[in-house]
Amino acid sequence: MYQKLWNKCYGGICVLNFYSLKGIRFESYTGFKYGRYLITTDDVEKIDRPYEVEIGFMKEDGSTLRESVKITYKDFKNRMIKGMQESYGGFALVDIDFPQFDNIPSLKLSNRDTFAVGSPVAIIGHQWEQNNIAIKTGIISSHYLHQGKKLLMYDVSTDRGNAGAPLIDAETHEVIGIIGHRLSTIHEEYKALMNVINANIESLKLSEGKLNINDIDPIQVLIANQYQIKHLAQEVFRKASFTFGYALPINYVCEFFDIAELEKDIVYIKVSNNNDEF
């Protein structure tokens, strides 16, 4: 089952690597191709000062680049579809109509709006540490109402790099949801922690330079300590793994597209039925 799913879907999975001005990769997410568009998490709009973005698709081994394009983050944001972010939270659409991606297949979006608890699912997403893509399997474990949207709760091991990855029906190989890192409870706790640390730093800066002990400003020491805690928290959050998570149902995306019109020009991969299964 899952070997067929991989063979049919890996080609349309996109790796998004974000680089600093010095060429250091500091953030990575997942996306997937649908027609001329990249569908991914809306987290890509909130990254702190990236300079360049690499949009890449992998070969069958999951670790070798098949095709990739590097553009500035400014160009990347200009390619985002305008006017829909305000109404459609949880995902972003990016125009990736580059000639390098003409032969990259699209994933098929499900036209269902209900998904049974216990249904087998898979995620194909970016592994932050290894900079590759991998398949993970599990089930739909429940549903969850979040800010007026009925989300899919899944029991699959995920990490930060999986944000924007497709949640795929293991039987039909259709995309039924989009993994959302910012939908997790731990993200809300992380934001609260960052707010406390930032408030501490701002408060300490008000007293900076007003106290001196043996030529040492203890306030500066405390500020440095807060920055160290902040950096540690950022690294822990970036590398944390979760045993479950939430996905935005794909029907929210389908409301934006004229599916029937787009389907006319979309190319999908066809997989032979005689493939070996796991």
Image: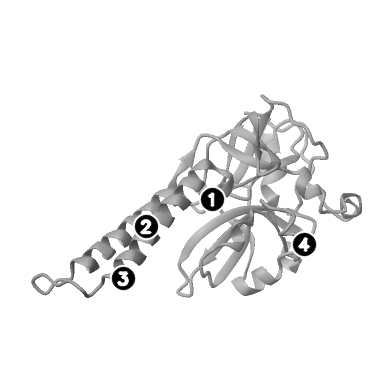
Mark 1 and mark 3: Cα distance apart in space: 37 Å
Relative to 22, say whether 45 is above or below: above
Mark 2 and mark 4: Cα distance apart in space: 46 Å
Label 1 sits on a secondary structure element that is helix
Residues under numbered marks 1 and 3 in contact, where contact means CB atoms less than 8 Å apart: no
Can you tell which quarter of the image residue 230 is in? bottom left
Can you tell which quarter of the image residue 199 is in? bottom left
Label 2 sits on a secondary structure element that is helix
Q: Residues within 10 Å of mark 3 (few under 14, many from 20)?
A: few
Quick one: label 1 or label 4, which is nearer the N terminus?
A: 4
- Three-letter amino acid code at the position of disc 3: Leu
Mark 4 and mark 3: Cα distance apart in space: 56 Å
Judging by the rendered image, the residue that carries numbered circle 3 is: 206
Which of the image's four quarters has the C terminus?
top right
Label 4 sits on a secondary structure element that is loop
Q: Nearer the viewer, mark 2 or mark 1?
A: 2
Q: Nearer the viewer, mark 1 or mark 3?
A: 3
Can you tell which quarter of the image residue 42 is in? bottom right
Residue 135 point in image, percent of width and height? 59, 40
Judging by the rendered image, the residue that carries numbered circle 1 is: 161
Question: Residue at point 58% right, 45% down?
Answer: 183
Q: Nearer the viewer, mark 2 or mark 4?
A: 2
Quick one: label 2 or label 4, which is nearer the N terminus?
A: 4
